[in-house]
Amino acid sequence: MERVLFGDNQFFGVNHSSDEKARAQTIRFQEDDAIMAVLDVAIDEGINTFMCTTHDRIGEICNRIRGNEKYKDFKLYPCMPYAHKYANAITELGYLGTIKQFVPGNIFSTFAKGGLAFMKKDFTELAKLMIDAEMKMFKGINTPVIWVQNVITDLLLGLGMTDFLVVFYNHIKEKYRAEPGFITMNLPLLLDTLEKAGIENPTVCASINKIGFRMSGGIKKYEEVIGQKRCKLVAMQVLAAGAIPPKEAFEYVCSLNGVDSILFGASSRANIHQSKSIIDSCSVLKHGPTSKVNYY
Amino acid sequence: MVRTGIIGLGKMGISHCAILGAHPDVNLVAVCDSSALVIDAFKKHSRFQCFTDYRKMIAEMNLDAIVIASPTKFHTEMVNYALDHSLHVFCEKPFVLNPEDAEILAEKAEMKNLVNQVGYHNRFLGTFNEVKVLLQMNILGELYHFSGESYGPVVLREKGSTWRSQKGQGGGCLYDYASHTIDLIHFLLGKPMEVSGTQLKRIFSNDVEDAVYSSITLNNGLRGQLSVNWSDETHRKMNTQITILGKKGKIIADATEVKIFLKEANELLVLPKGWTVKYLTELTPNVDFYLRGEEYSSQIDHFIKCINNSETINKSSFRSASCTDQLISKLISDNK
């Protein structure tokens, strides 16, 4: 994992502090060219990993990247699922309708893989089929880490359905030969839970920032857990939705021994350059300029 | 530990289930749903006792409290049954379909001294609570208008087959979306009493409205507009916004920010003349377990606090939710 990862919220109208800014970004990134242009800037600035949700539009971005010499060293970290797609479908179609819509093949045909799993009420198999459906758009793309979004990780944590987290972990390792990652808003609880399920030193992405925003259980508890180095850790929401000035924000996360990578999103060259430079300069002392986490 | 059960494992029920499951003061012991698919999944993969009959769950599980997240048309019967069995009740919104039932159930819960709450989560958002404080400080002076708006992308095509798309079951934009907006107006500005010029507009649904437009008069005489549409795909998810106009300025607030415009500086509150923007990051206290917005965890936490400490006054009681039910029925009559 590289020290700096580039995020995609800005492209899809996700802004945790302002719905108005979110709308402006949706308008700006209406065309795929606009997204590609920003990705090119990120690459120019030395960022080679794009962490992106499995939004329909990422499929188009994959088509641009696939087989293109220019992007041969570019990596995508898919984060699944794009939750609003499912949430809206459940409201409109119900659970059964949603499964019908998103599990490939006819679930009422026992001859189809999905149908068999459905008839047998094999939820583990259904989960794998849904993962595969989400991964379809990334065929032929380098995806060394594959993430499950926090809404699913944390839902399963709360429900105590740890076995599905294990299913995800094993399926990603076995079928995609990739590192499974868990995004969470509940870092301490997640680590305790995964360790109990036999998953040691997992790859985790959590909200980590100087003001404790979306750090469930509080910043003290987080700092303690981060210091224990029980996971390969990506810090997200480092700027706390813009509440902390960049220098102060990045200095804080870079000072935490136990944070391996930092995820941020930005739309302008100036902001991308600034963020990358601050992280690089704060990281040299602790991690060395080319520090990477090696998985295998 | 509050021994708790849940009826209904739809989108809201499953979210409550996770939040309760992770709550340190709650022992979530049982879940109930009529769908064999859902109950089988819980039987195989969860630690909870599973039921398809809620009466059986209440009879066997010795519960202190219950969360009801079934389709709205079942609320009256289930809430009533739960109160008869002396359970504290958290019920999803909208409360009930028949506004007379709402008053009866509120009365019953109060008589029996049971904690009663309806899932209007906007009351637990940092931004809207900030607006409430600012209004209590009379920051805008005499108010003369408001508009309450909610938009989102639920029904975008001509199809759909759940209870939310069926008339008479609590489906439609009015029950599902506008109830939140009405409750927020009530929470911040006063009790909505009368409506006029109501339009319940079908856009894609066959049986129910997809948009609600109306003029609302509050008990304090203030009037404003209600504008709600769940077939608006220019919003990524549900977005509720309130705009309040007064002689001294204006406030525009949604889940993420509060924008305040003042004609003159307010020295007491240290707010300058002109615009001030406050963000949820400074207005939102941390929760112990986060799933999908602090407000969902906070409202459950509040429910449990009210059970554990009888002094705590509930922020979203049956009584206050009943007001929304009454207004919904007025909107339906006014549209005819």
Image (cartoon, coloured by chain):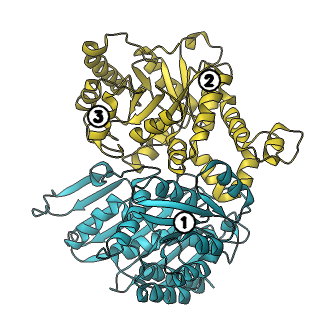
Determine which residue is flagged by label 1: B5
Task: Name the amino acid, label 3.
Answer: Glu
Asked whether disc 3 touches disc 2, contact meaning CB atoms under 8 Å apart, the reply is: no
Residue A9 in percent (x, y) is at 47, 37
Number of the label disc, if any, that sits on residue A261: none
Assess disc 1: are there few (<14), some (14-19) or many (≥20) residues with their C-alpha within 10 Å of its C-alpha: many
| Colour used to depict chain B in the structure image | cyan
Q: In which quarter of the image is the C terminus of chain B?
A: bottom right
Residue A7 in percent (x, y) is at 46, 30
Asked whether disc 3 touches disc 1, contact meaning CB atoms under 8 Å apart, the reply is: no
- CA gap between label 3 and label 2 equals 29 Å
Residue B75 in percent (x, y) is at 59, 77
Residue A172 in percent (x, y) is at 62, 27
Specify whether residue B170 is in view. no
Marked residue chain, label 1: B
> Which residue lies at the image location 42% right of the left edge and 57% below the top edge?
B297
Determine which residue is flagged by label 3: A223
Give the SS element for disc 1.
strand
Number of the label disc, if any, that sits on residue A173: 2
Q: Do marks 3 and 1 share a subunit?
A: no
Drawn side of residue A247 relative to residue B221, left or right: left
Residue toward you, B229 or A252? A252
Q: Quadrant of the N terminus of chain B?
A: bottom left
> Which residue lies at the image location 26% right of the left edge and 40% below the top edge?
A220
- Letter of the chain shown yellow in the rendering: A
Q: Do marks 2 and 1 share a subunit?
A: no
* In the rendered image, the vertical position of residue A34 relative to residue B288, given as above or below: above
